[in-house]
Image (cartoon, grey):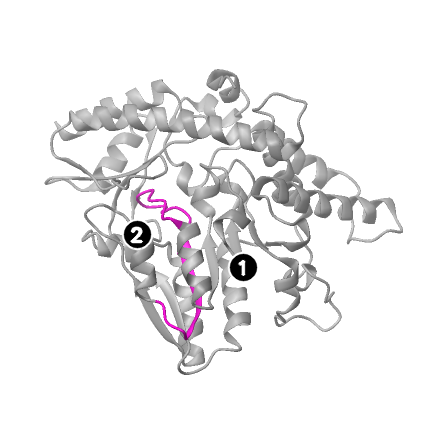
Amino acid sequence: MAYDVSALRAQFPSLASGNAHFDGPGGSQTPQSVADAVSATLSSPIANRGNVTAAERAADAVVLGARQAIGDLLAADPRGVVFGRSMTALTYDLARTLSASWGPGDEVVVSRLDHDANVRPWVQAAQAAGATVCWAHFDPGTGELTADAVAAALSDRTRLVAVTGASNLIGTRPPVAEIARRAHAAGALVFVDGVHLTAHATVHVGELGADFFACSPYKFLGPHCGVLTSDPALLESLHPAKLMPSSDAVPERFELGTLPYELLAGTTAAVDFIAGLAPPGAERRSRVLAAMAAVEEHEDRLRERLERGLADLPSITCWSRASRRTPTLLLTFDGQDASDAYVFLAERGVNAPAGSFYAIEASRWLGLGDTGGLRLGLAPYSNDEDVDRALQALADFVR
């Protein structure tokens, strides 16, 4: 399919500011259709879910529609789609639920590559249960986290393996399906942080082997909320703490309190926007696949253009080196602070933040401490002009 980035950009009101946005890994810009869906839901008759009044039925339709949209985006069963305030909150809730059955001698595997939202909830839950935390290490020279590295941390006492689908710091995409296969062979469950991956690649949770897969719509053009998906049968076997009169049905038993209907409507609109990048006619999952393949090709082309330009600039180290990665580059500068580059670029209309971006273990493992580096993240609306502006600003900075 043809990819018309100019037509796509015209649907993002925020891009009229003229800034070049490389801050997508922290939260993408939002198309008008998503904002309209949020606004329309807030301004229409709405109530707690039910089937008596029109307002109740509208709320129910919004929730079921959002579950189906996420199901189409991730090739997941809509009956196993859980919504929450954020991926972090959902992971903490699940960690508390799963760890209720853990005890001394049990083990949990986490990786040095991950965002802390897929590290600390499991570490803290294991510590509270008296279980052991085992670490899988990535190669700081290549940025690769291999299946062998994760397998080295497995044993017959491993209860869960937590691994990222893609690093939000350096873009590495580990071989999740092979990691899951080995984890399952050891009898462990697999939790995949798909927050960064979902924004840049097609996802099929079954093919990944994820028992649990979490993502955040605001990273793929939607509003600020979190999503957790799993097999409904697995969710049926889990019993989180909840209010006594609240529903014990799956997935509702995992959703604490009234859902933000306007954000769920925005989530559906975001998936529809992605699907709308593909030619009409096919069902939504097929259009999502075609659209995300085109997005990935577009972003990879821009990443290569950016990398070629960076190679010509002195005193810059790029830490994004894995053979399979998202268009996310982490840079440091000889004799200059990344935080100064952040300010320098911002003054020139190039938004590229600096930090470790909550991937604190990864930043430390790379030898960058808690300060990390400057992160350049491409998005579906990025274009050649954005890349050229960033390269020119970086050239001015290192000079």
Residue that appears at 65% across and 62% down: 233
Please state the horizontal and vertical placement of residue 124, each as a whole percent of the image: 41, 71
Q: Which residue is mark 1?
A: 90
From this view, report whether residue 342 is shown above or below residue 87: above
The quadrant of the image that shows the C terminus is: top left
Q: Which amino acid type corresponds to the residue marked 1 in the rendered image? A: Leu
Magenta residues, as a range?
154-175
In terms of depth relative to the viewer, which is nearer, 29 or 69?
69
Q: Is residue 392 left or right of residue 336?
A: right
Say which mark, if any, is on residue 145: 2
Q: Which residue appears farthest toward the bottom when viewing the image? A: 104
Q: Is residue 166 magenta?
A: yes
SS for dot 2: loop
Q: Is residue 103 left or right of residue 147?
A: right
Q: Position of residue 285 (x, y in %)?
A: 62, 35
Task: Name the dominant secondary structure of the magenta segment.
Answer: loop
Other residues around mark 1 within 10 Å, as few (<14) / some (14–19) / many (≥20): many
Can residue 206 be seen by looking at this rendering? yes
